[in-house]
Amino acid sequence: MALNAKPKKYKYPLCYDPYGPRPSPLNKIVELAERIAALTPEDLFLIGPALRDKLRHPKMQPISAEGMDVGTQGGGAGAGAAKVEEKKAEKTAFDVKLEKFDAAAKIKVIKEVRAFTNLGLKEAKELVEKAPVVLKQGVTKEEANDVMEKIKAAVGVAVME
C-alpha cells in the first residue's frame, strides 16, 4: 500500500433509510388520500373514531396533564386568557409543610412523620429538625388534612400549601 494514497470518498445518501427504497403506493391508496384531504373539517373530525371502530382499536384513555408544567402554547391575548382560566381552576394537589413543633414532643412528631413518609428513623429526625420543611407534596386535600391532624395531635404545627 502506498504511503501517499488518498482515502476513498463514499457517497452517502441525504437520508439513511435502513429498509432501502420503498415502492410507490398503490393508486387506490393515493386516491383514498386525495379524497380524505378534500373532506371538510367536520368530516375529518369524525374519521378517527370511525376508523377506530372499524379496525377494532381500543379507545385511548385521556392523559391527565395535572402537575405538569406545559407552559403557554401561544402568545399575546391567548396567554392572558389561559392564565385567568388557570387561576379559576380549583387546586387539587397540596403540599403539607411542618412549620414548627414543641421541643418536648419532638419524638412524637418524628414518629408521625415516619408513619406517613415511610422514612427511616435517622431520615425522619433530620427532616423534622429542618423545620419549616415540606413533608409531603402533591397530595389530595383529604390526605393533607389527615396529615395535619396527626401532626397537630403530636403537638406540631403543619400547614397546607
Image: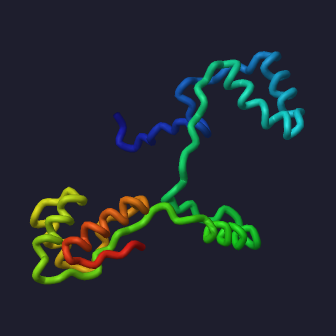
- Image coordinates of residue 3 in percent, x first then y, are 35, 42
Question: Residue at image x 55%, y 24%?
Answer: 19
Q: Which residue is rendered at x = 72% and y = 70% of the image?
A: 81
**Nearer to us in this view, 34 or 1:** 34
Identified at 63% across, 65% down, the residue is 72
User: Does residue 47 sit above or below 25 in this rendering?
Assistant: below
Numbered circles on residues, count? 0
What residue is at 85 percent from the left and 22 percent from the top? 31
Counting from the top left corner in percent of width and height, residue 43 is at 85, 34
Vertical comparison of 123 with 11: above or below: below
Q: In screen coordinates, is 68 left or right of 135?
A: right
Q: How is the image coloured?
A: rainbow
Q: Nearer the viewer, residue 38 or 110?
A: 110
Q: In which quarter of the image is the C terminus?
A: bottom left
In the image, taking residue 111 as reference, residue 156 lies left or right, namely right
Q: Quadrant of the N terminus?
A: top left
Which of the 4 image quarters holds residue 82? bottom right
Up the image or down, 149 lies above or below 50; here it is: below
Q: In this view, does 145 lie to the left or right of 42?
A: left
24 over 75 or under it: above or below: above
Nearer-the-camera pick, 46 or 10: 46
Q: Quadrant of residue 105?
A: bottom left
| Residue 47: image location, x then y, percent | 77, 30
Give the quadrant of residue 114.
bottom left
